[in-house]
Image (cartoon, grey):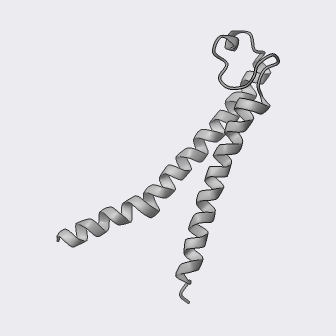
Amino acid sequence: MLVDNKFLRVLHWIMIANFVSGMAYAAWAVMVLLAPEGSSGGPLFGQAATVNMELMARRRLYSLEFWIASSGLACYLGITEYLPRILRQQKERA
């Protein structure tokens, strides 16, 4: 049974959207949701020395989630977009 090309394209974009939404959520959680009291959000800079360890650990876990999602997106795009183009170019040269 052959899978419809349109279905695969939609699935491809759903997977990309899933990775991007995971990255956006993790970034929002680190920068806004888990901002220390008295901070407007964003990087900690000098406050990093005074933030309690529980908040710091939670921020680091969300940061790790962001990096996992961005690495997954990079690998997925490399396999589905970049690699086929390289192989097509090599095949045309041969």
Residue 9 coordinates in the image, percent (x, y): 55, 72
- Numbered label tally: 0
- Residue in view at x 63 percent, y 36 percent: 64
Question: From the viewer's perspective, is 75 left or right of 66?
Answer: left
| Quadrant in the rendering for residue 3 | bottom right
Instruction: Point out the residue furthest to the left here.
Output: 94
Residue furthest front in the image? 40
Q: Position of residue 60 (x, y in %)?
A: 68, 29
Q: Nearer the viewer, residue 48 or 41?
A: 41
**Image-based side of 89 in relation to 37, left or right:** left
In the foreground, 24 or 78: 24
Residue at position x 56%, y 90% from top?
1
Please identify the quadrant where the C terminus is shown: bottom left
In the image, is residue 41 above or below residue 52? below
Using residue 87 as the reference point, say whether residue 1 is left or right of it: right
Question: In x, y percent, where is residue 71?
Answer: 53, 46
In the picture, residue 16 is in which quadrant?
A: bottom right
Q: Residue at x 48, y 57 (%)?
A: 77
Q: Name the outermost residue toward the bottom.
A: 1
Q: Is residue 9 shown above or below 21?
A: below
Image quarter of residue 39 = top right
Q: Nearer the viewer, residue 47 or 61?
A: 47
- Measured along the vertical axis of the image, is residue 55 above or below residue 29? above
What is the x, y in percent for residue 19?
62, 53
